[in-house]
Image (cartoon, rainbow, N blue to C red):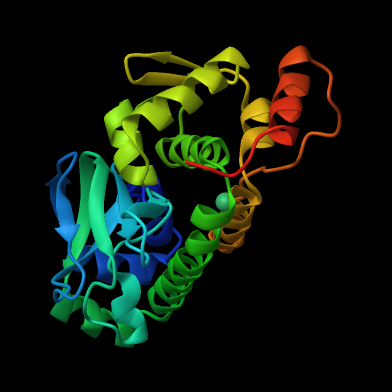
Amino acid sequence: MNQTSELCTGNRILDSLPVAERKRVLHCCEDVTVLEGESIGFPHEVIHYVYFPIDCVVALMNQYEGLDESSFTLVGPEGSVGASLAVGIDTWQVRAKVFQGGHALWIPIQAFKHLLQHAPTLDRQVRMDAGNQVQCSRDALMCVKRHTLSQRLAGWLLMLSDRVGKKHMYASRQMLAEHLGASVASVARELTYLVRCRAVTDDNGHIEIKNRRSLRRVACRCFDRKSRLNRVRAAENGRRIDYAPSKRLDDASDRFVLFRLRHQNPAT
Ligand SMILES: [Zn+2]
């Protein structure tokens, strides 16, 4: 095993750093376990740690005027949480709530600030990550107001699948309702629709994506926008995520999806 692979953490930002810089950064990292449902950051509170998820997924949640709190993005092993420190913001601007528990590496704030002065690649990566998250937060208001719950649910499931790196995920209707800022009944209705069009199966919250292309056809364009942001970051890290659009409709489920999209109104 060479030195580079020995230093791999599973977090793309950390693993993209040059070896010497990565050693310096990992020296300041501590392993931490985060639990499902745990809030690791509250709006206006001081940021104490920057998290680099390994196998956990953290939802960044915001409450827009007149609307229920909802997730505007998910952060998994491709990103960081609390990275706004890199752009001079040392308080949480949004709530950071663990959607899927697991492991992360964290760096205490003082050590992180010191590292930014001596780790230029880390500085660049977390600045870009923080910028992407701010952009996602800005886009989310338009998404919630203009796009249907089924569009948002489909995009959210795709985003979760990309973060956990699997087609199988656990997301109860209660959890989905909380993160989409909708009622459980509305989420149940839209999930049933996705099952009917054979995009997913749902066994008491154990959701499996059966037809990613169908799910992508339902999802609003916000998912593609977030995916493009990820691709930029992934390319920077030497990896690419393939979000190539499908070119034709060749099965019944795709046609059913398009029919429904043409005949529904934005509503939750
Ligand atoms: Zn949208």
> Could one spot residue 167 in this view of the protein?
no
* Rendered residue at 79%/15% (across/down): 251
Is 120 on the left or on the right of 199, as rendered? left
* In the image, residue 96 above or below residue 89: above
> Residue 32: horizontal and vertical position, in percent?
14, 50
State the quadrant of the N terminus.
Answer: top left
> Residue 27: horizontal and vertical position, in percent?
19, 66
Give the quarter of the image for residue 22: bottom left
* In the image, residue 139 above or below residue 9: below
* In the image, residue 221 above or below residue 80: above
> Residue 10: horizontal and vertical position, in percent?
36, 46
* Rendered residue at 42%/21% (across/down): 207
Q: In this view of the protein, which residue sits in the foreground, 34 or 156?
A: 156
> Residue 125: horizontal and vertical position, in percent?
45, 71
Is 89 on the left or on the right of 148, as rendered? left
Is 114 on the left or on the right of 172, as rendered? left
> Could one spot residue 153 in this view of the protein?
yes
Q: How many marks?
A: 0
Q: In this view of the protein, which residue sits in the foreground, 178 or 47?
A: 178
Q: In this view of the protein, which residue sits in the foreground, 118 or 50?
A: 50
Is 184 on the left or on the right of 190, as rendered? left
* Rendered residue at 14%/76% (across/down): 46
* In the image, residue 247 above or below residue 197: below
* Rendered residue at 47%/41% (across/down): 268
